[in-house]
Amino acid sequence: MTPPRFAPIPAGLPATVPFIGPETLQRRRGRPFAARLGANENGFGPSPRAVAAMRAAIAGIWQYGDSTSFDLLQALSAHLSVPAGALVVGEGIDGLLGLLVRLMVAPGDAVVTSEGAYPTFNYHVAGFGGVLHKVPYRDDAEDPAALIARAHEVGARLLYLANPDNPMGSWHEGRVIEAMLADLPPGCLLVLDEAYAEFAPAGAVPRIAADDSRVIRMRTFSKAYGMAGARIGYAIGHPELIAGFERIRNHFGVNRVAQAGALAALADGDWLAQVQGHVAAARNRIAGIATGNGMAALPSATNFVAVDTGRDGGFARRLVAALEEDGIFIRMPGVAPLDRCIRISCGPEPELDLLARTLPQVLRRL
Amino acid sequence: MTPPRFAPIPAGLPATVPFIGPETLQRRRGRPFAARLGANENGFGPSPRAVAAMRAAIAGIWQYGDSTSFDLLQALSAHLSVPAGALVVGEGIDGLLGLLVRLMVAPGDAVVTSEGAYPTFNYHVAGFGGVLHKVPYRDDAEDPAALIARAHEVGARLLYLANPDNPMGSWHEGRVIEAMLADLPPGCLLVLDEAYAEFAPAGAVPRIAADDSRVIRMRTFSKAYGMAGARIGYAIGHPELIAGFERIRNHFGVNRVAQAGALAALADGDWLAQVQGHVAAARNRIAGIATGNGMAALPSATNFVAVDTGRDGGFARRLVAALEEDGIFIRMPGVAPLDRCIRISCGPEPELDLLARTLPQVLRRL
């Protein structure tokens, strides 16, 4: 048997994956987690109206989904006051980021992001032969000035920034992002990952015209809308950029049940407000648990809290492993100095109660 | 505003899409179709056990799916008597074909397929800069000898063949496919699209070792299992080839509800057998309707029937349009001489009754 001869770009890629999922960890430890607080999933769940719409849509699952996601695009257009031509629906932000990188980045092209920011974006850039340039965080936040400076230096095609940020939960005011646009090098597109926008203070969401060709914004139904397993999200950008996705996207790739669920979820503003309230309360609760255990919660505009252990990455890694052993799934930033922190997702009371009981025991053990 | 500067490959792609979906056609005509018989969907639907499993899984949709699709891989491994390492689960065959082309085809690489075969495969090849070489059908079937000869001529990296074939419904005996493997040029991988394998006579499915590095087989839950809208399928290939998908696939891209549904569907062999029976009966019914209207049904090993109108492509196109006007969605092959045919998907009795009533009226009108 001759081994497969991959095309040059994939031939040069490592076999590593961006994340190990909680199901894999559960199989390794031989028992399920009692608290699933690691993937920034939303344990408060989707709107009951979305649940009902999805259950009803199962009956029609023998049909492919609408390849244009027409109804959802119309609803998003009305909801966001953005023309439908400035919107594309895709298989979550992960899927859309992959398409965007493919659309914009040729092998050898420069891309700028922050050291410790979203690994799946980096995975896509490497996957299409782009060259990543990374800028350190500054005060636990992505550093707009340094990102812009680096983008000029390397002639970046894309500049990635998540606002609010993952994994730190920090955020910039909308006007900071707006100011970045004016300073972008020509031909560089800002990839603004707004996965957590619905949890952020109003001022943190920049006001950007839908036909601004300098930026593309990514949103998702995975976080505030509680539908991570449905794999549905959208991007907002200049209509000519958005039209580019039609050339390469998997046209019938969005799950039909996810389309129905997203449509219903979007219409249930009351549920969203309730989730936002639960998440804010859970952030406070997590901060209290952190303080009670001699650690410091960082301010968060997301549905998770980065907790500064006051020690180093080695300690934080042992803490994550020990919590995992005791049935609590959390994650942590991958690089120093962010990796002095652990990252805890907001979840319902029982899961946080368990965290409150388990954390002191684990800390004593370490 | 400067227009977006796409990377060279996408910059050169047309804005055309492989298929226009029935929802788009419905919006154009302003009313829903009364019979949806165009996309080879399976109107007999998924197993009630799969439906129940999917309904139950909605409660957990706030969680990402298992990135490894572990349970489904284990079940497929047992079902197919193939090691799990020879299997990868993805977002339907369309998604898996895109990944495969990306994994194997560098810009300028030659790929061989049949003139009139699956457009979405061609879309992916063009989308990654591959160069398509097409071989005509012979007697309404893909032509193994001509495909192999062309693959040698052009030094193909991939050779695509669907068995049974879409859009004609024809098939080759498994031993014909097995013989092709021996004749492939070195370094050329056979992409064997078996989307319709469950509808084919047993002899049409080749016996190929799971670790045969000359071929990758694509299967889906969209057709016989009635879950097109769920977007889930799998590929069988040499473990080293399959491992390559880990480098580029969207690891959390498979819908969690689809995973649960596929697992349950796979376990319900009785339902599959029932669907196979319904489909066989529907093929006969469609053949009868064709004959009754002075047309000839081609033999089919799939859940659709190509019906020879006895006229040319222009006539067939008018017939498809007229049926569409009267509420019946069907499709037809895209190129001559296949386009003398229309393609009718097997569906439940009421839809075929409507076809039986409508077709003579439409033919009189043309």
Image (spheres, coloured by chain):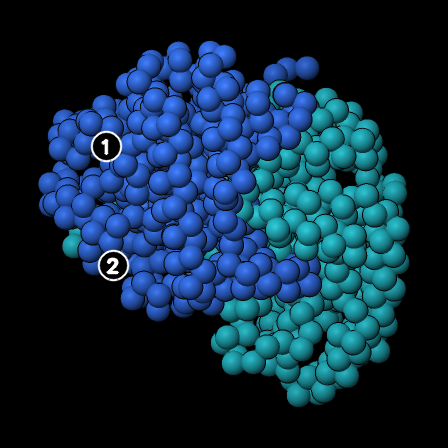
Chain colours: A cyan, B blue
Q: From the viewer's perspective, is the residue at label 1 or at label 2 nearer?
A: 1
Q: Residue at x 58, y 64 (%)?
A: B53
Q: Which mark is residue B210?
A: 2
Amino acid identity at mark 1: Glu
Q: Which mark is residue B8?
A: none
In this rendering, would B167 be left or right of B71? left
In this rendering, would A276 be left or right of A323? right
Q: Nearer the viewer, residue B21 or B319?
A: B319
Q: Residue at x 84, y 78 (%)?
A: A292
Q: Nearer the viewer, residue A363 or B323?
A: B323
Q: Where is mark 1, residue-wise?
A: B142
In this rendering, would B102 be left or right of B138? right
Is residue B120 visible to us here?
A: no
Amino acid identity at mark 2: Ala
Q: Nearer the viewer, residue B19 or A15?
A: B19
Check the residue under mark 1 and report the chain it is in.
Answer: B
